[in-house]
Image (tube, rainbow, N blue to C red):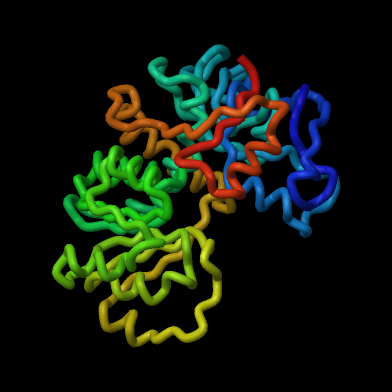
Amino acid sequence: MRAWSIEKPGGREVLKQIEVEKPVPKQGELLIEVKAAGVNRTDTLTRQNTGLSRPYPILGIEVSGVVAENQSTDPDLNAGTRVCGLVNHGGYGEYVIMPADRAMILPDELTFEEGAAIPEVFLTAYQTLYWLGELEEKEKILIHAAGSGVGTAAIQLASQLSQATIFATAGHPEKLEKAKELGAHVLVNYKEESFDERVNEVTEGAGVDVILDFIGASYWEMNLESCAVDARWVLIGTLGGSEVAEVSLGDLMKKRIALKGTLLTPRSDAYKAQLSKEFAEIAMPLFKEKQLKPVVHTVIPFKELPEAHRIMEDNENTGKIILKVSD
């Protein structure tokens, strides 16, 4: 089968299309015929990871497709079932192994390309908002990188599941327009104004209850200023740096701020299975009803994977970049 790996860790030029044997599922696993795969920042980081050694993995951590073989006891996942979900590498291939307890049945109303736009970003957003951020009904939330895959997912979930007041930041007007379309209430172009000033103006100094932070160091002070008392600040990225020169723990204590850091990809199989199960029960029906929508920026042909990585690394996308693997 066709698949994408790397010749060695490095830039986009190391991406290499290879021919490998079709994987064989073990007990509790599914063999998925991949129709589409999501392209994620974790894929570009894996590609550059100098700690990797041969044999290098097939890239890709989320897919949609059709069950080709079911080695689990779940009768709802027999051959022919349309599914999407997270995998432990291998998503950029024509077939991939998926733990059966991570598979989410894909509604007929969604295309495979839309299905591949769900698992990583919506599961990350759900975990961040509810398992870590503990977002309550009608609270106020600040979502950075509002045009990203996780950002667009988080806006929808906070709107549809919690009726939250949503503050969204981005650096391009079209990304802010998309955020507004998806349910954001207060839009901030960080290139033109300071989001903390806008937050405190709108909230009359009260601040927000939850912050979804992809940026890290460069936003430290402004995030701190934006926090309400008892705010939950969840850090899921460090696009603006990972080291803060001076941190006053007293400032965190004064507002009783809970600062949490997280990554989804390194989580255990059991954690991902539990998260997938809860999300499938609570949120997947909303896709069928069109209350939640996968946001697809572009669909890239399988042979043009390097272009998909370029779009990701140049931050051109609003929503997901999807690799079309087969018809």
Q: Nearer the viewer, residue 186 or 166?
A: 186
Depicted 78 relative to depicted 91: above or below: above
Count how many numbered circles sit on residues in the image.
0
Residue 102 placement, left or right of 52: left
Image vertical order of residue 96 relative to residue 134, above or below:
above
Q: Position of residue 144 (x, y in %)?
A: 39, 57
Judging depth in this view, the residue of 175 and 116 nearest the camera is: 175
Position of residue 39 in the picture relative to residue 120 (left or right): right
Percent coordinates x, y for residue 235 in the rendering: 44, 63
Quadrant location of the C terminus in the rendered image: top right
Note whether 1 is above or below 263 in the view shown: above
Residue 318 position within the rendered picture, expressed as x and y whole percent measured from the top left: 46, 41
Residue appearing at x 42%, y 20% in the figure: 110
Residue at position x 27%, y 68% in the image: 231
* Res. 178 image quadrant: top left
The answer to which image quadrant residue 51 occupies is: bottom right
User: Which residue is most to the front?
Assistant: 192
Query: Residue placed at 36% from the left, 62% from the top?
Result: 192
